[in-house]
Image (cartoon, rainbow, N blue to C red):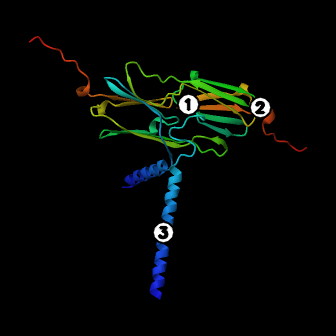
Amino acid sequence: MTEENTAVKAEKANLVKSQKLRALTPSVDIYENSEEILLFADLPGVKKDDITIDLDNGQLTVVGNRYMDQEKDMQLEEFGSAQFRRVFSVPQGIDQTKVDAELNDGVLKLHLPKSESVKPRRIEVRQG
Amino acid sequence: MPTQLLDLQRMLSSMEALRERMNALNGEFYATTPRYESAWGFADNWPKMNLLDTGDQIEIQVELPGFAKEDIHIKVQGNYLELSGSRKTACPNGYTVHRQERENPTFTRSMTLPIEVDSGKATASIKEGILHLILPKSIATRPQQITIR
């Protein structure tokens, strides 16, 4: 019972924390070939564990929270803690179990492989 | 007469409630509106930069996602700082492009620092797409404690 309560509290605290973040739209590149859709998103300063990627009902939601220390003696401040958030429509035929994401130098790389049924196929003509 | 007064009071209290609601709404609105960063804007102040003065040194943070350390050039001279670089965001081979917003092939940003720095002792590191530049102040400009004899 108490465990559940602390979990709920932690979740609420997280919610409050993320609600206060400034909302930003990350820049993305989207590429496609016959095997997959490839997405790159700029998420500078976001740690791996602060990224959530949800794929639900053809809607892909990428959220990355950046937490930065609040410094008092900041003389020039152009960026700070923020929430990068972007929602995409994903076409039918993405193999949800094989979606793969990696984070490198503040860039998220997301592989969305196509399922076998939608991959282009060449049909051989038999001798009749 | 008392009923009229009660009506007036009720009306005023509901107006008060509405005003409070509006204030809360406004607060929420301003908190979520980007102050410096616009969603698409990286025209003349790109890449974004923070500058901190920590007494003995100046610390600069720059948003540079996807930049390798070879891609960034930093030049410091006296109190002049110049950052330049380029990154490779070319379309991978065999892929068709759906959307390409990340192309910022080259950038240059220069600024005059508030104080002279010791460029020989400057250090820089890049982590998670953020460049950290530590510039120790030159001895002459550091705050000095003077003891009274």
How far apart in space, not on screen, are marks 2 and 3 (Cα)?
A: 58 Å
- Residues at marks 2 and 1 touching, judged by CB atoms closer than 8 Å: no
Q: Secondary structure at mark 2?
A: loop
> How far across and down, in percent of the image, does residue B32 sit?
50, 49
* Residue linked to disc 2: B138
Q: In terms of sequence position, does the residue under pointer 2 or pointer 1 come before the other?
A: 1
In the picture, the disc for residue A78 is none
Chain bearing mark 3: B
> How far across and down, in percent of the image, does residue A4 sit?
37, 52
> How far across and down, in percent of the image, does residue A100 sit?
36, 30
Residue lying farthest front? B43
Quadrant (top left, top right, bottom left, bottom right) of the C terminus of chain A: top left
In the picture, the disc for residue B17 is 3
Residue lying farthest left? A128
* 3 vs 1, front mark: 3
Residue at horizontal 53 percent and vertical 51 percent from the top: B31
Residue at horizontal 53 percent and vertical 56 percent from the top: B27
Q: To which quarter of the image does residue B115 belong?
A: top right
Task: Please state which amino acid type lies under the numbered disc 2.
Answer: Ser
Residue at horizontal 34 percent and vertical 23 percent from the top: A33
- Residues at marks 3 and 1 touching, judged by CB atoms closer than 8 Å: no
Task: Please state which amino acid type lies under the numbered disc 3.
Answer: Ala
